[in-house]
Amino acid sequence: MKISNSENIIQVENLITHYGSKKILSSVNLNVKKGEIMVIMGGSGSGKSTLLRYLLGLNKPTSGKIKLLGKDITKMSDNQLHQMKRKIGVSFQGGALFGSLSVSENIQLPLREHAKLDANTMRIMSQMKLEVVNLAGFEDLMPSQLSGGMIKRAALARAIILDPPLLFFDEPSAGLDPVVSAELDELILRLRDAMGMTIVVVTHELDSAFKIADRMTILDRGKILLCGTVDEVKNSDNERVYNLLNRKPRRDRVDVDEYLQRLTGKSLNLEAKKVSP
């Protein structure tokens, strides 16, 4: 699909975030264009899940701007942010379905929160979205009766029930077998092509990332190592990008003082701890 070069749906400018005194994201700059699938990847602790939380407006950054659909969410009031979330769909890693509600009732939750519709209209809308994700006929089942892949698709139906222009996925293929994962990849591509959605996917699954991505952003230690097309990522001569793609273990030396400081919040002077012979 040809991506627009003129309209950025997401603009992140000089984003800096902290957990307590610990800096997590450092001067992150990122643009996602209309109709694009952007995949965000990185090793454990790279900051990819943290970046997703800030893109969703779940936390306020230390500094920087995050513009969604042209509006800076870092400056929004709670009410303004609530209105913005009507234009955003989110499919969480574990599905996050409510076990006490049927599939249809789960999918209707955004409608109950953001729209004033009668019960029959909401049920029809939920059935339509279940057809989109190939779950037609399963609306009256409970989440406990679904397989892992079906839970993911039901969660996706809920995420798109309001036809949002912007959709976020957190580890869509996690815990799925290769066949179900491939089916979900195809579904993501169809959503982009058929509904014109801009999609951001956080994942560690390389096969999935290479299949669906228009561009990829590689994070490491809270910084962007590379943002480019699949070919640009595959052909990168950056050592850390190469290690991630080829599952090479990091050879970093651990600074014991820094590690203990992160755990305790206190600096440890190792020299002072030495015992004289």
Image (cartoon, rainbow, N blue to C red):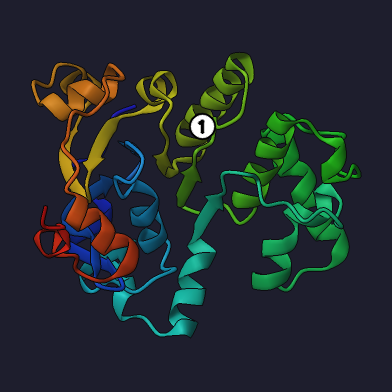
* Element on which disc 1 rests: helix
Tell me where residue 148 appears, x and y as whole percent.
Answer: 71, 32
Toward which corner of the image does residue 239 lie, by quadrant? Answer: top left
Circle 1 residue: 188
In the shown orientation, is residue 227 left or right of residue 20?
A: left
Instruction: Give the x, y percent position of residue 174.
Output: 55, 32
Is residue 70 visible in this depiction of the protein? Answer: no
- The residue that appears at 86% across and 51% down in the rendered structure is 102
- State the residue lying farthest toward the right: 140
Q: Is residue 18 left or right of residue 57?
A: left
In the depicted view, which residue is nearer to us: 254 or 30?
Answer: 254
Q: Quadrant of the N terminus?
A: top left
Residue drawn at point x = 61 percent, y = 14 percent = 179
- Which residue is nearer to you in this view: 45 or 186? 45
Q: Amino acid at mark 1?
A: Ile
Label 1 Cα crowd, 10 Å radius (few <14 / some 14-19 / many 20+): many
Looking at the picture, does residue 148 appear above or below residue 254? above
Please name the residue shown 22% across and 22% down the image: 243
Q: Quadrant of residue 39?
A: top left
